[in-house]
Image (cartoon, grey):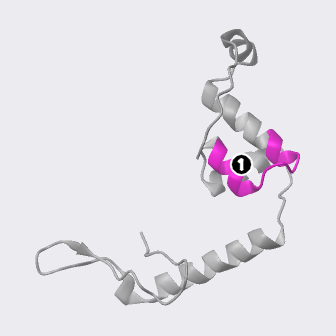
């Protein structure tokens, strides 16, 4: 993915009492609150997990923006999680050589093995 660099004068960061990482989070949150970025894009840009980004948003009083595609993604993730955690054969095992093993095919498109 191509990236664009933005220069922020140090005195601006100092005046705002922000580190570069905090400034990036603030920009991500501002763009999300203006509905210019989805939660997924904003959290990735901010370098946070979705859970961390949702907590940050809530702590700032930013309402959750939830559209049909995000709902579909969440429902798919829940379905995968339930499937992966309900099947005891999906747990990490050991091969004869002592290597960690997992089943990588579960018949559900987009589901990854439990970590």
Who's the residue at 74% across and 14% down the image?
A: 12
Residue 68 visible somewhere in the drawing: yes
Label 1, on which residue?
42
**Residue 78 at what x, y percent from top left?**
62, 78
- Left or right, residue 45 beside residue 100: right
Who's the residue at 17% across and 80% down the image?
A: 95
Instruction: Compare residues 94 and 8 and report the one nearer the observer.
Output: 8
Q: In the rendered structure, which segment of residues is drawn in magenta?
A: 30-45
Q: Main secondary structure of the magenta part?
A: helix
Marker count (numbered): 1
Q: Is residue 67 magenta?
A: no
Q: Quadrant of residue 96?
A: bottom left
Q: Is residue 39 magenta?
A: yes
**Residue 32 at what x, y percent from top left?**
81, 48
- Left or right, residue 37 beside residue 6: right
Q: Quadrant of residue 88?
A: bottom left
**Residue 39 at what x, y percent from top left?**
74, 55
Q: Quadrant of residue 46?
A: top right
Q: Residues within 10 Å of mark 1 (few under 14, many from 20)?
A: many
**Residue 76 at what x, y percent from top left?**
65, 79
- Identify the secondary structure beneath mark 1: helix
- Quarter of the C terminus within the rendering: bottom left
- Left or right, residue 108 beside residue 54: left
Where 106 sits versus 34, above or below? below
Who's the residue at 69% across and 79% down the image?
A: 75
Who's the residue at 81% across and 43% down the image?
A: 31
Where 26 sits versus 58, above or below? above
Instruction: Compare residues 105 and 77 and report the one nearer the observer.
Output: 105
Instruction: Compare residues 38 and 19 and report the one nearer the observer.
Output: 38
Where 99 sits versus 86, above or below? above
């Amino acid at each position: 993915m191509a990236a664009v660099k933005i220069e922020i004068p140090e005195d601006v960061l100092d005046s705002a009492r922000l580190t570069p990482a905090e400034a990036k989070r603030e920009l991500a949150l501002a763009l999300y609150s203006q509905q210019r970025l989805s939660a997924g894009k904003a959290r990735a840009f901010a370098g946070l997990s979705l859970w961390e980004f949702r907590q940050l948003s809530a702590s700032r009083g930013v309402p959750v923006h939830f559209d049909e595609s995000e709902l579909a993604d969440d429902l798919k993730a829940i379905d995968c999680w339930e499937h992966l955690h309900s099947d005891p054969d999906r747990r990490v095992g050991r091969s004869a050589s002592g290597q960690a093993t997992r089943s990588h095919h579960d018949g559900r498109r987009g589901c990854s093995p439990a970590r």
